[in-house]
Image (cartoon, rainbow, N blue to C red):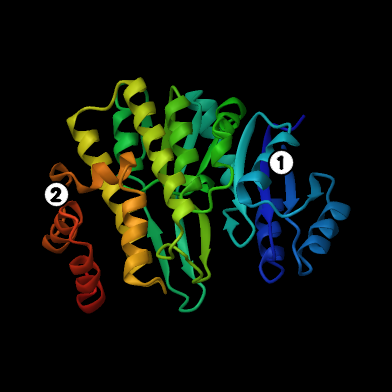
Amino acid sequence: MPKYSVLLTVYNSEKYLDECFNSILCQTFNDFEVVVVDDASTDSSGKICDKYARKDSRVKVIHKANEGVNVARKTAFENSTGDYILTVDCDDIIDHDLIETVDGIFEKYSCDIVMFDLSIFDNKTGKVTIKKMAEKSCFYDKKNKKELYLILLNRCMNSLCTKCCRREIYGRSFDFLKYLSMCHGEDWFQSAIQVYKMKTGYYLQRPMYHYRNLGSSLSHSFDLDSFRLNSDSLSDVKAMIIDDGYFDAEVKAMWKAYARKVVNTLLLGLSSSDLNMKEKIGTVKSVADTDIYKTAIDSDADYGSSRMTVLKFRLLKNKMYRLLFALMKNRNL
């Protein structure tokens, strides 16, 4: 059995798939397999995957009905055999020595997870931005694991693709089956599970994963079901951190700030939607009982927020919905 399994989920990416495959198959470390799940692509992506499977025995391709990236990743994992798991998305590429590099770290530190940085390539402008997870490379264990939770809540650990972890740790990412349908925040939630389950980890300050930004983000779109799932998942993350013994005042403050960001995304989506005022207000009222909403409107979450953000959530707390949406529309609040 191979030491590493690379899980590659594919959907309608014919334009970039060759580059992605080449970056994986040209690794300087050879003891790995590539488990590809074609999630019912309607372009030639499936045929491209089959082409690589015929050329390279390390590649295994599974064609399935479209059920979303989480189910596709779960399918890939269930058909993998490696001791260590790496996730790659079909539009992106990885450094040719990524697996060799993380293998050296696993061998040296015997850790559960290796984390690294990513670069973001803007497909329209060609601009490259490096996203650093932390200020320097670091080994993490029980003594400083709290720092990983702070990094997570600061949204500096959003991608599942910037981590390689032991098989048993990766498999726990799917413990919460109700979140398999998540289309926003799924990587963040699974990353939280991995941090919770790990005993030791290592962060390498080097961008080895290269994300292609195609400019199709839906982060400000209105999706009530997605919000409810995010609310539930954030509550579950809070429970994990408490159980792990790291939910002190500093982490609690960061968690509240994160909750406010999630609710703000809902408000932005509502503000720009085609719903009338009555429907917008009704939607806000329908989520007022969620833990994430109650946390976001709490004045304790004001710390670190801008004046405009504080004003927005004061209006929300005082149920001045019409004034809130009017200000958001006219002042881009």
Residue type beneath disc 2: Asp
Residue 247 vertical placement versus 160 (above, below)? above
Write the residue at 85% across / 59% down. Answer: 51
The residue carrying mark 2 is 302
Write the residue at 39% across / 43% down. Answer: 231
| Residue 56 on image: x %, y % | 83, 50
Pick the residue in front: 267 or 129: 267
> Which mark lies nearer to you, 2 or 1?
2
| Residue 156 on image: x %, y % | 36, 48
Direction from residue 56 to residue 167 in the image, left or right: left
Residue type beneath disc 1: Thr
Direction from residue 298 to residue 228 in the image, left or right: right
| Residue 121 on image: x %, y % | 48, 67
Write the residue at 72% across / 55% down. Answer: 66
N-terminal label among 2 and 1:
1
**Residue 136 in sight:** no
What number is the disc on residue 224? none
The residue carrying mark 1 is 75
Direction from residue 220 to residue 6 in the image, left or right: right
Pick the residue in front: 149 or 29: 149
